[in-house]
Image (cartoon, helix red, strand yellow):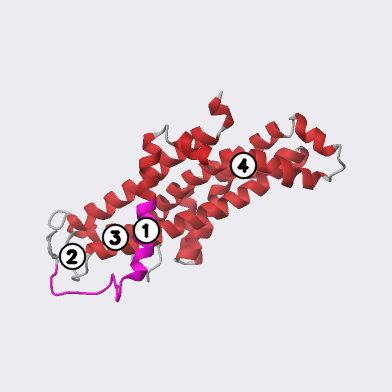
Amino acid sequence: MKAFFAGLSRHPSGLISLGIIVLLVALAVSVHLVPHFDPKAMTDDVMVGPSLAHLFGTDELGRSVADGLLAGIQVSLAVGFFAAFGATVLGVVIGASAGFYGGWLDGLTMRIAEFFQVIPSFILAALIVAMVGPGLPQIVLVVALLSWPQVARVMRGEVMRVKQLEFVDAVRCLGLRERHVLAGEVVPNAIAPVLAVGTLIIAQAILLEASLSFLGLGDPELISWGRMLNSGQRFLFNAWWLSLFPGVAIFVTVLVFNLLGDAVNDVLNPRKKR
């Protein structure tokens, strides 16, 4: 862990991004500690611009935009983290099996991965969510299913590299079964670059959720940044704050996860150290 942060310290953008992400997580958690927090609460101040009373203004129903942004953090981070976790687990299992055993299994899984990658993910996600119904669990599941090929390809390549190393042959000489060699020795030594891909998937998931919510395919019971953008587009010229602040929130969040993913890749990927 010390070596990781030492390597990350050489990437100022990565450190700054990590700090912003920690702040976002803290804000998402702290919302539950605020008594009677309700982002849907209405006031008499309708369509009021940013001021000391309402830091980011209010919308057409008198709801605080700042409260909506805080609620949106929870939705975006939940989708990002859970979707990335699901995609990473699925991709690691499939990619490791394909790279280690090879043969027909490798060919089949890579053809399936190519199928998912050639289809525009946003269009496919919108079609699936429209068919199964809008909701946060549906979006998480769809994003995970669409993102696993990225992890699987990276994992496959790393497993193919690691399984040719001498220590793997030495472990086989001990009489361990192939699945134990894969799970106990090969995967732990090939997992590092996958973590960087998982970080990038978080950013993709947040952007995809915002896009689906903008189209009305998000959870109607939750306030999200994409839904706020959808509501604000009707008042773009006379209430700019309704669209500006959610848009900036999406941009900054996606950017910091991408920057952190690049930094993590530089630190953990052994090929970057050559």
Which is nearer the N-term, disc 4 or disc 3?
3
Q: Amino acid at mark 2?
A: Thr
Q: Which residue is mark 1?
A: 26
Q: Amino acid at mark 1?
A: Ala
From this viewpoint, is residue 84 visible?
Answer: yes
CA separation in Å, label 4 and label 2:
46 Å
Q: Nearer the viewer, residue 223 or 195?
A: 195
Query: What percent of the width, then of the height, locates residue 143?
Result: 50, 54
Which is nearer the N-term, disc 3 or disc 1?
1
Q: Which residue is mark 3?
A: 69
CA separation in Å, label 4 and label 3:
34 Å
Q: Which residue is mark 2?
A: 58
Query: What percent of the width, then of the height, locates residue 90?
Result: 62, 51
Disc 2, disc 3: CB below 8 Å?
no
| Rendering quarter of residue 229 | bottom left
Which is nearer the N-term, disc 1 or disc 4?
1
Q: Which range is magenta?
A: 22-46
The residue mark sitting in front, 4 or 3, is 4
Q: Amino acid at mark 4?
A: Ile
